[in-house]
Image (tube, helix red, strand yellow):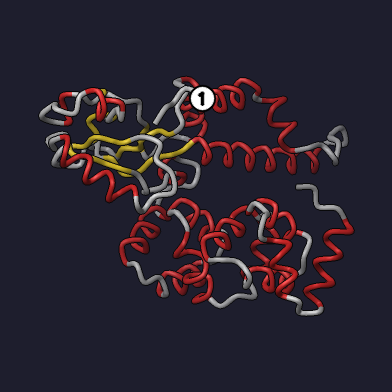
Amino acid sequence: MEMDEEYIDNVKNLIEQKDAENVKALLIDLHPADIAELCNDLSPEEARFVYRLLDNETAADVLMEMDEDVRKEFLEILPSETIAKRFVDYMDTDDAVDLMRELDEEKQEEILSHIEDIEQAGDIVDLLKYDEDTAGGLMGTEMVTVNENWSMPECLKEMRQQAEELDEIYYVYVIDDDERLRGIFPLKKMITSPSVSKVKHVMQKDPISVHVDTPIDEVVQAIEKYDLVAIPVIDSIGRLVGQITVDDVMDEVREQSERDYQLASGLSQDVETDDNVMRQTSARLPWLIIGMLGGLSLIHI
């Protein structure tokens, strides 16, 4: 949606009048990315008014779509407990880690102390230990895993339970009793081979994967080369510890392009200040963008 000056001024006037009902009516059909674009043009206090009208999951999505500088300014006016319970609790771990990296260590510790889900807090702490320019620093821990020794009925039951906690399912990963990655479970087999005794008899062996210390640019290349929508991440002994999705990679490409643009702007007068970031990205990496988007149509779940 195009946010013109008249639309933004209208929202600001409604906020000034504390007209929550009409502001909410304007927001109800907007995508989180559009709401974030709107919030980028509001003051922190105006944005705070908007956030109070959103459900928790939408609020978390909007926060991560905001420009980093605007988001940082907004977070500075919020108590750590609010950030934890209003936003982090409703984020995937990779988004939560990205958010935490923007804050100082003291603020991070305060937020972590207010997260009620100990497992989630532990995952965030673990991921913060990785270099942000590696696969470990980019991965999330939300994924569906099945054991290679499970029967088909047991596999289906476990998949259903795990899927209830996820927004998207990219692949189903097969692990052994030591949590080492063994394969990918092809969902088509659930229909075509329902009587097979064990998962390991139908799994696709030796899946493409990356290590936690693999540089981000190599992760990007692997996803593009093999037309993947996600790639599993393993540790030094082959245990499955997370996955990186094509959305994560696209975000990283965009952020890298923005950093390159800012660097170029400071060093050269030849850079056009109104260049669109994604236009620059596609000019430098057309094969990457097209390849990754094309991969989406090749995966059927």
Spot occupied by residue 110 in the image (x, y as percentages of width and height):
46, 74
53 vs 70: above or below: below
Q: Residue at x 18, y 39 (%)?
A: 147
Is residue 47 found left or right of 244 in the rendered image? right
Residue highlighted by disc 1: 297
Quarter-of-image position of residue 10? bottom right
- Residue 216 point in image, percent of width and height: 49, 36
Q: Is residue 272 above or below residue 290?
A: below
Figure quadrant of residue 212: top left
Q: Quadrant of residue 226?
A: top left
Q: Is residue 51 above or below residue 208?
A: below
Q: Quadrant of the C terminus?
A: top left
Q: Is residue 274 left or right of residue 24?
A: right
Q: Amino acid at mark 1?
A: Ser
Residue at the spot 51% in from the left edge and 71% down from the top edge: 107
Q: Nearer the viewer, residue 109 or 157?
A: 157
Q: Residue at x 39, y 52 (%)?
A: 127
Q: In x, y percent, where is residue 25? A: 71, 65
Q: Residue at x 41, y 47 (%)?
A: 140
Q: Of helix, strand and loop, which one carries label 1?
A: loop
